[in-house]
Amino acid sequence: MHELSIALDVCRIAEEHVGAEVLARVTAIGLDVGNRAGIEIDNLEFCLEALLGSAPFGSGRPEIRRLEGNELSVTYVEVEDDDGS
Amino acid sequence: MTVRRIDVREKVMAKNDELAVQVRDRLHAHGVPSLNLVSSPGSGKTSLLERTLDALGARVRMAVVTGDVQTQNDADRLAARTDRLVQAVVTGGACHMDARQIITALDEIDLEDTDLLFVENVGNLVCPASWDLGEDAKVVIFSVTEGEDKPLKYPRMFERSDYCVINKIDLLPYLPFDMDRAIAYAREVNSDLRFFFTSALTGDGMEDWYQFLTALARVEGAIRA
């Protein structure tokens, strides 16, 4: 039920790491989510797909690795760069 | 175009946890113990607090931060029972309270004039378990109309709580509720849970709860002195 709040925090973390002006070029956000993290993973994925597919993001998608335990963390952000930039 | 991967390795909710540490530090600096009341909707959190404010208000200086998804109804009910400040937090749709809301609420409370802080969370047995509000302990309220197996269905909330108030015991004669089984299920997920058995409506069993709260406030008061 609180997956949207979690998804928004994921977006905040991504923005902190890449900067607001780069969000439109984010292609993927990697997450580790444990089966005891209190998260409905399919719901979190749905929320992230919605958020990462619209402004200030462009066409990003979540890449969720399902683990045992309480883990809930953002592991990487992938950004598309212009060649030579 | 090339894709560049930036390593992050940051825990989600770390921001909330940082703010919860600030809440905890602030409360401890003033020697104010705090309890976060969590439960499903309608289990009697507000009624328990109403009766507690009535019974202990003259002896224990209690402050309440109460959260609801919409309306200030609970805050209004509690404010009618005390001259002290009741802080209302309307989460505007969110299914839980977060530590930032507590920090904002604490700005309005004179902690030097407070012996005990209650946070009445949004009625929900799932989401509030994930948010540390900086409280000393969670108290899960579990009413006998809910069925014995709630601890097994919502284990995280019972795992995260230190205390369990089994409420509405006045209704036991009318319900097929098996108290022994309920306690066994709760202990199955958290063997350290301490129980209280209350009726916030009739007052039955409240004395044990009052003694616990009075001791909690007094112990912390001694530390402050």
Image (tube, coloured by chain):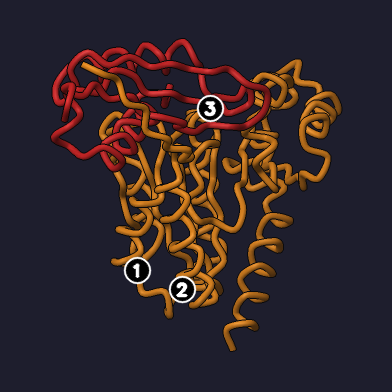
* Sequence-wise first label, 2 or 3: 2
The residue to which callout 1 is attached is B109
Separation of marks 2 and 3 at Cα, in angstroms: 30 Å
User: Share a chain, discs 1 and 2?
Assistant: yes
Question: What is chain B's hue in the picture?
Answer: orange
* Sequence-wise first label, 1 or 2: 1
Q: Provide the chain ID for the residue under circle 3.
A: B
User: Share a chain, discs 2 and 3?
Assistant: yes
Question: Where residue B176 appears, x then y in whole percent?
Answer: 76, 15
**Rendered-image quadrant of the C terminus of chain B:** bottom right
Residue drawn 59% across the image and 43% down it: B200
Residue drawn 44% across the image and 63% down it: B22
The residue to which callout 3 is attached is B126
The residue to which callout 2 is attached is B114
Dot 1 amino acid type: Ile
Assess disc 1: are there few (<14), some (14-19) or many (≥20) residues with their C-alpha within 10 Å of its C-alpha: some
